[in-house]
Protein backbone atom coordinates (compact mmCIF):
# COMPACT_ATOMS: atom_id res chain seq x y z
CA UNK A 1 0.00 0.00 0.00
CA UNK A 2 1.18 3.50 -0.84
CA UNK A 3 0.14 6.76 0.79
CA UNK A 4 0.86 10.11 -0.87
CA UNK A 5 0.97 13.22 1.30
CA UNK A 6 1.11 16.70 -0.21
CA UNK A 7 1.86 19.92 1.66
CA UNK A 8 -0.37 22.80 0.53
CA UNK A 9 0.37 25.45 3.18
CA UNK A 10 0.57 25.92 6.97
CA UNK A 11 -1.64 23.12 8.38
CA UNK A 12 -3.22 22.19 5.06
CA UNK A 13 -2.26 18.79 3.66
CA UNK A 14 -3.80 16.15 1.46
CA UNK A 15 -3.44 12.42 1.92
CA UNK A 16 -4.21 10.07 -0.96
CA UNK A 17 -4.64 6.35 -0.44
CA UNK A 18 -6.43 3.67 -2.45
CA UNK A 19 -8.09 6.20 -4.73
CA UNK A 20 -9.49 8.30 -1.87
CA UNK A 21 -8.24 11.77 -0.86
CA UNK A 22 -8.34 13.33 2.60
CA UNK A 23 -7.93 17.11 2.78
CA UNK A 24 -7.11 18.79 6.09
CA UNK A 25 -7.65 22.41 7.21
CA UNK A 26 -7.84 24.30 3.92
CA UNK A 27 -7.12 28.02 4.63
CA UNK A 28 -8.26 29.56 1.34
CA UNK A 29 -6.22 32.18 -0.49
CA UNK A 30 -3.02 31.38 1.44
CA UNK A 31 -2.58 28.35 -0.82
CA UNK A 32 -0.69 29.14 -4.02
CA UNK A 33 -2.75 28.83 -7.19
CA UNK A 34 -0.31 26.42 -8.82
CA UNK A 35 -0.50 24.12 -5.80
CA UNK A 36 -4.27 24.37 -5.67
CA UNK A 37 -4.67 23.57 -9.38
CA UNK A 38 -2.46 20.53 -9.06
CA UNK A 39 -4.54 19.35 -6.14
CA UNK A 40 -7.77 19.85 -8.10
CA UNK A 41 -6.41 17.66 -10.89
CA UNK A 42 -5.61 14.99 -8.32
CA UNK A 43 -9.30 14.73 -7.34
CA UNK A 44 -10.74 13.63 -10.67
CA UNK A 45 -12.85 10.51 -10.19
CA UNK A 46 -11.92 10.14 -6.52
CA UNK A 47 -13.78 10.34 -3.22
CA UNK A 48 -12.86 13.41 -1.17
CA UNK A 49 -13.01 13.67 2.62
CA UNK A 50 -12.70 17.26 3.86
CA UNK A 51 -11.63 17.58 7.50
CA UNK A 52 -11.76 20.98 9.21
CA UNK A 53 -10.49 20.97 12.79
CA UNK A 54 -11.81 24.42 13.78
CA UNK A 55 -12.99 27.77 12.49
CA UNK A 56 -9.82 29.88 12.69
CA UNK A 57 -9.08 31.56 9.35
CA UNK A 58 -5.69 29.87 9.00
CA UNK A 59 -7.44 26.49 9.11
CA UNK A 60 -10.76 27.05 7.35
CA UNK A 61 -12.19 28.86 4.35
CA UNK A 62 -15.68 28.28 2.91
CA UNK A 63 -13.97 28.22 -0.48
CA UNK A 64 -13.09 24.60 0.30
CA UNK A 65 -16.37 23.64 -1.38
CA UNK A 66 -14.85 24.27 -4.80
CA UNK A 67 -12.86 21.06 -4.56
CA UNK A 68 -16.02 18.98 -4.44
CA UNK A 69 -16.69 19.98 -8.06
CA UNK A 70 -13.74 17.85 -9.17
CA UNK A 71 -14.35 14.90 -6.87
CA UNK A 72 -16.68 12.00 -7.54
CA UNK A 73 -18.17 12.30 -4.05
CA UNK A 74 -17.37 14.54 -1.08
CA UNK A 75 -17.76 14.09 2.66
CA UNK A 76 -17.36 17.19 4.84
CA UNK A 77 -16.33 16.49 8.42
CA UNK A 78 -16.43 19.91 10.06
CA UNK A 79 -15.78 20.80 13.68
CA UNK A 80 -18.96 21.99 15.40
CA UNK A 81 -17.53 25.51 15.81
CA UNK A 82 -17.49 25.92 12.01
CA UNK A 83 -20.77 27.65 11.22
CA UNK A 84 -20.96 26.80 7.56
CA UNK A 85 -23.30 24.63 5.52
CA UNK A 86 -21.98 23.76 2.07
CA UNK A 87 -24.26 23.00 -0.85
CA UNK A 88 -24.18 19.24 -1.16
CA UNK A 89 -24.52 17.05 -4.20
CA UNK A 90 -26.88 14.06 -4.12
CA UNK A 91 -24.13 11.71 -2.92
CA UNK A 92 -22.29 14.16 -0.65
CA UNK A 93 -22.47 14.18 3.13
CA UNK A 94 -21.89 16.63 6.00
CA UNK A 95 -20.91 15.63 9.53
CA UNK A 96 -20.80 18.15 12.37
CA UNK A 97 -18.00 16.84 14.56
CA UNK A 98 -18.23 17.51 18.30
CA UNK A 99 -15.40 16.98 20.79
CA UNK A 100 -14.91 13.56 22.36
CA UNK A 101 -17.23 11.82 19.92
CA UNK A 102 -17.08 9.07 17.31
CA UNK A 103 -18.41 8.99 13.75
CA UNK A 104 -18.46 6.56 10.83
CA UNK A 105 -18.05 7.60 7.18
CA UNK A 106 -17.80 4.81 4.62
CA UNK A 107 -15.02 2.59 5.99
CA UNK A 108 -13.57 5.38 8.13
CA UNK A 109 -14.01 5.44 11.88
CA UNK A 110 -13.41 8.93 13.27
CA UNK A 111 -12.75 9.78 16.90
CA UNK A 112 -12.43 13.39 18.06
CA UNK A 113 -10.51 14.93 20.93
CA UNK A 114 -11.35 18.34 22.35
CA UNK A 115 -8.60 20.81 21.47
CA UNK A 116 -6.87 22.99 24.03
CA UNK A 117 -7.23 25.91 21.60
CA UNK A 118 -10.33 25.56 19.42
CA UNK A 119 -12.36 22.80 17.82
CA UNK A 120 -11.16 19.22 17.70
CA UNK A 121 -8.35 16.87 16.77
CA UNK A 122 -9.12 13.79 14.66
CA UNK A 123 -8.08 10.15 14.95
CA UNK A 124 -9.09 8.47 11.70
CA UNK A 125 -9.08 4.72 11.23
CA UNK A 126 -9.53 3.07 7.85
CA UNK A 127 -10.89 -0.40 8.41
CA UNK A 128 -10.37 -1.72 4.90
CA UNK A 129 -6.63 -0.97 4.79
CA UNK A 130 -5.75 -0.96 8.52
CA UNK A 131 -4.40 2.61 8.53
CA UNK A 132 -4.60 4.98 11.50
CA UNK A 133 -4.09 8.72 10.97
CA UNK A 134 -4.01 11.44 13.62
CA UNK A 135 -4.55 15.11 12.71
CA UNK A 136 -4.10 17.52 15.61
CA UNK A 137 -5.47 20.79 14.24
CA UNK A 138 -4.61 23.38 16.90
CA UNK A 139 -4.21 20.86 19.71
CA UNK A 140 -0.58 21.28 20.79
CA UNK A 141 1.75 21.97 23.69
CA UNK A 142 0.98 25.68 23.86
CA UNK A 143 3.16 27.24 26.56
CA UNK A 144 3.52 30.85 25.50
CA UNK A 145 5.83 32.65 27.98
CA UNK A 146 3.50 35.66 28.19
CA UNK A 147 0.64 33.51 29.49
CA UNK A 148 -0.02 33.05 33.17
CA UNK A 149 1.43 29.92 34.77
CA UNK A 150 -2.07 28.56 35.35
CA UNK A 151 -3.04 28.99 31.70
CA UNK A 152 0.17 27.36 30.46
CA UNK A 153 -0.27 24.43 32.81
CA UNK A 154 -3.86 23.88 31.71
CA UNK A 155 -2.96 23.81 28.01
CA UNK A 156 -0.02 21.49 28.59
CA UNK A 157 -2.22 19.20 30.70
CA UNK A 158 -4.74 18.77 27.88
CA UNK A 159 -1.97 18.09 25.37
CA UNK A 160 -0.41 15.49 27.68
CA UNK A 161 -3.76 13.76 28.19
CA UNK A 162 -4.33 13.38 24.44
CA UNK A 163 -0.76 12.20 23.86
CA UNK A 164 -1.22 9.61 26.62
CA UNK A 165 -4.42 8.39 24.96
CA UNK A 166 -2.61 8.09 21.64
CA UNK A 167 0.14 5.94 23.17
CA UNK A 168 -2.49 3.22 23.45
CA UNK A 169 -3.17 3.37 19.71
CA UNK A 170 -1.22 2.23 16.67
CA UNK A 171 -0.56 5.52 14.91
CA UNK A 172 0.71 5.15 11.36
CA UNK A 173 0.73 8.82 10.33
CA UNK A 174 0.57 11.76 12.73
CA UNK A 175 0.07 15.39 11.79
CA UNK A 176 0.96 17.52 14.81
CA UNK A 177 2.12 21.05 15.53
CA UNK A 178 5.59 22.54 15.38
CA UNK A 179 6.17 26.20 16.23
CA UNK A 180 9.65 27.36 17.16
CA UNK A 181 8.26 30.57 18.68
CA UNK A 182 7.44 28.51 21.78
CA UNK A 183 9.91 27.01 24.26
CA UNK A 184 8.32 23.61 23.64
CA UNK A 185 8.18 24.03 19.83
CA UNK A 186 4.47 23.19 20.44
CA UNK A 187 5.31 19.63 21.41
CA UNK A 188 6.61 17.66 18.39
CA UNK A 189 9.52 16.14 20.30
CA UNK A 190 7.34 14.80 23.12
CA UNK A 191 4.78 13.61 20.60
CA UNK A 192 7.28 11.58 18.58
CA UNK A 193 9.03 10.13 21.63
CA UNK A 194 5.83 9.07 23.40
CA UNK A 195 3.39 8.18 20.60
CA UNK A 196 6.03 6.70 18.27
CA UNK A 197 4.10 7.11 15.00
CA UNK A 198 5.54 5.40 11.95
CA UNK A 199 5.49 8.72 10.13
CA UNK A 200 5.33 12.26 11.50
CA UNK A 201 4.17 15.38 9.62
CA UNK A 202 4.92 18.75 11.27
CA UNK A 203 2.06 21.23 10.79
CA UNK A 204 1.25 24.86 11.67
CA UNK A 205 4.44 26.42 10.31
CA UNK A 206 2.90 29.59 8.81
CA UNK A 207 5.23 29.05 5.86
CA UNK A 208 8.36 28.81 8.06
CA UNK A 209 9.25 25.43 6.63
CA UNK A 210 12.88 25.87 7.68
CA UNK A 211 11.79 25.00 11.23
CA UNK A 212 11.57 21.40 10.11
CA UNK A 213 15.33 21.34 9.49
CA UNK A 214 15.85 21.65 13.25
CA UNK A 215 13.39 18.87 13.99
CA UNK A 216 15.01 16.50 11.50
CA UNK A 217 18.47 17.29 12.87
CA UNK A 218 17.43 16.07 16.32
CA UNK A 219 18.57 12.59 15.27
CA UNK A 220 15.42 10.56 15.79
CA UNK A 221 15.02 6.85 16.14
CA UNK A 222 14.75 5.57 12.56
CA UNK A 223 11.40 3.98 13.42
CA UNK A 224 9.70 7.38 13.00
CA UNK A 225 10.21 9.11 9.68
CA UNK A 226 9.52 12.83 9.27
CA UNK A 227 8.06 14.53 6.20
CA UNK A 228 10.82 17.05 5.53
CA UNK A 229 9.00 19.40 3.15
CA UNK A 230 10.53 22.74 2.20
CA UNK A 231 7.88 24.51 0.09
CA UNK A 232 4.17 24.29 -0.80
CA UNK A 233 3.50 21.54 -3.30
CA UNK A 234 6.13 19.18 -1.89
CA UNK A 235 4.92 15.62 -1.54
CA UNK A 236 6.12 12.28 -0.26
CA UNK A 237 5.07 8.69 -0.92
CA UNK A 238 5.24 6.32 2.03
CA UNK A 239 4.84 2.57 1.64
CA UNK A 240 3.27 0.26 4.19
Image: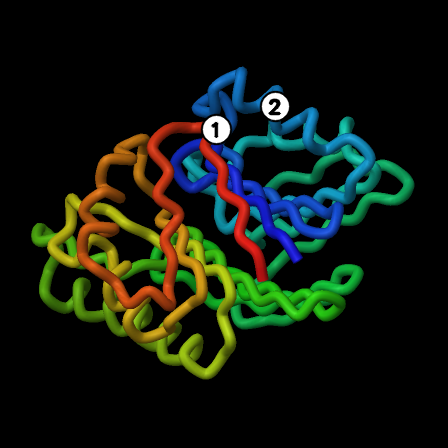
How far from the left and from the top, in percent, is residue 189? 24, 62
The correct choice, above or below, for 3 with respect to 40 in the image is below
How far from the left and from the top, in percent, is residue 67? 69, 30
Q: Nearer the viewer, residue 24 or 232?
A: 232
Q: Is residue 45 left or right of residue 164?
A: right
Mark sitting earlier along the chain (1/2): 2
In the image as oriented, which residue stretches furthest toward the bottom?
168
Q: How many marks?
A: 2
Q: Residues within 10 Å of mark 2 (few under 14, many from 20)?
A: few
Residue 47's quadrant in the figure?
top right
Q: Nearer the viewer, residue 1 or 18?
A: 1
Instruction: Identify the residue position indicated by label 2 in the image.
Output: 38
The correct choice, above or below, for 44 with respect to 141 in the image is above
Q: CA distance from mark 1 to mark 2?
A: 8 Å
Tell me the quarter of the image containing the N terminus: bottom right
Residue 233's tag is 1
Tell me the quarter of the image containing the C terminus: bottom right
The correct choice, above or below, for 176 with respect to 13 in the image is below
Mark 1: secondary structure:
loop
Q: Nearer the viewer, residue 186 or 99?
A: 186
Which residue sits at x=48%, y=28%?
233
Q: Is residue 100 left or right of residue 204?
A: right
Amino acid sequence: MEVKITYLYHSCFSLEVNGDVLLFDYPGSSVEKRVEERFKDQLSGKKLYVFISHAHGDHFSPDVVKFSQNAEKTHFILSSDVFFTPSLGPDDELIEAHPDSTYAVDDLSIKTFESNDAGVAFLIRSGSIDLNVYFGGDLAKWNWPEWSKKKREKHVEVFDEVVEALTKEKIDIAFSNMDERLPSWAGPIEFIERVKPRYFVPIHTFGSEEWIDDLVEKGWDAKTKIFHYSKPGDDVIWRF
